[in-house]
Image (spheres, helix red, strand yellow):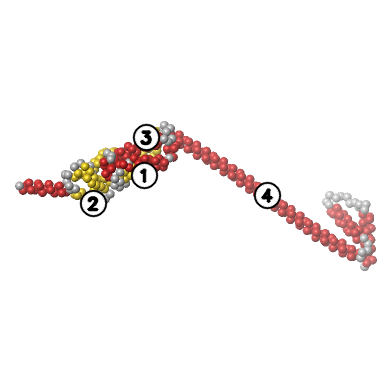
Amino acid sequence: MAAFLVFLLVFVIVIALKGVIIVQQAEVVIVECLGKYKKTLESGLNFIIPIIEAPRGVAWKVTQRGLDGQSYSYIKEKTRIDLRESVYDFPRQTVITKDNVSISINALLYFQIVDAKSAVYEIQNLPEAIEKLTQTTLRNLVGQLDLDETLVSRDKINVELRSILDEATNKWGVKVNRVELQDIIPPVDIQTAMEKQMKAERDRRAAILEAEGLKKSAILKAEGEKEAAINQAEGTKQAEILKAEGYAQARLIEADAEKEAIRRISDAFNNQGHPDKYLIAMKYLESLQDIAKGQNNKVVYMPYEATGILSSIDGIKQMLTTKE
């Protein structure tokens, strides 16, 4: 009798413990009553009726990386559903572009369960379903693009893929937040051809830049020479103008001096005699003096008109002597 009471006490304690469920923050537990959905347990302390009510087990695909660096997947049954945003690293897959080039792509998917009931009852093994849906959708999107478009349209593919997955997984109670393509790897021969093409394009751009640089240099040099020639011509012009102005001013000053000299000479003659002949004689003598100074002049001659000049000079001399 005592053994039975002990057994009964232990059984009651075990049953009572099974009726207490503590749910952590950002987790929920689906509870079924005799195989039918009963309620969803939120975070905190919860109680259920043992045997009649039980948490629903969910098949969940889990991926882990082994010691050899490879990723391994296995199915795990769990009763707690994580409501936090989850990241799923899809294994690398081969897809074919519109121009029949096989490329290797792997992606990251960020999703979050917003309706735990739908995630349990609307789809079996939610992570695997999302993975297969992502792979097929990615094949369809890449199949519509050429290789070059695929390589430069990563953001476009991410946006379209997220939109399609979010719409398809809506009835599963899942919200797809982001999709990121990690690597897009073409075949080796395509990579080699692309590298050669890129090198040729860089060489072409370098040649164009060099030609443009030489062109600009030649233009700047020509413009500099043009400006220099203009400045030089302008300077020469200003110099000639200043020289001409100086020469003209000198001539004017000289003319004024000669005018004053003639006036004084005329005053000295007291309006008598011939001052014009005097001036002609003086200019003639100055010219003879300049001729005599020449180093190559070997012959001294007296022009025919010199006698008339000498007579004028003699007359001037007599006039000045008489004046004294």
What amino acid is labelled 2 in the image? Gly
Q: Are marks 4 and 1 in contact (CB under 8 Å)?
A: no
Q: Are marks 4 and 2 in contact (CB under 8 Å)?
A: no
Nearer mark to the viewer, of 4 and 1: 1
Q: Which residue is mark 2?
A: 44
Q: Earlier in the sequence, mark 1 or mark 2?
A: 2
| Circle on res. 94 | 3
Looking at the rendered structure, the secondary structure element under dot 2 is strand
Quarter of the image for residue 116 reads: top left
In the rendered image, residue 1, in percent from the top left (x then y), is placed at: 4, 47
Residue at 31%, 41% in the rendered image: 171
Q: Which residue is mark 4?
A: 230
What amino acid is labelled 4 in the image? Ile
Question: Tag 3: Cα neighbours inside 10 Å, few (<14), some, or many (≥20)?
Answer: some
Q: Are marks 1 and 3 in contact (CB under 8 Å)?
A: no
Q: Residue furthest top?
A: 100
Task: Give whichever of 122, 228 is nearer the camera.
Answer: 122
Task: Give whichever of 84, 89 is nearer the camera.
Answer: 84
Q: Which residue is mark 1?
A: 178
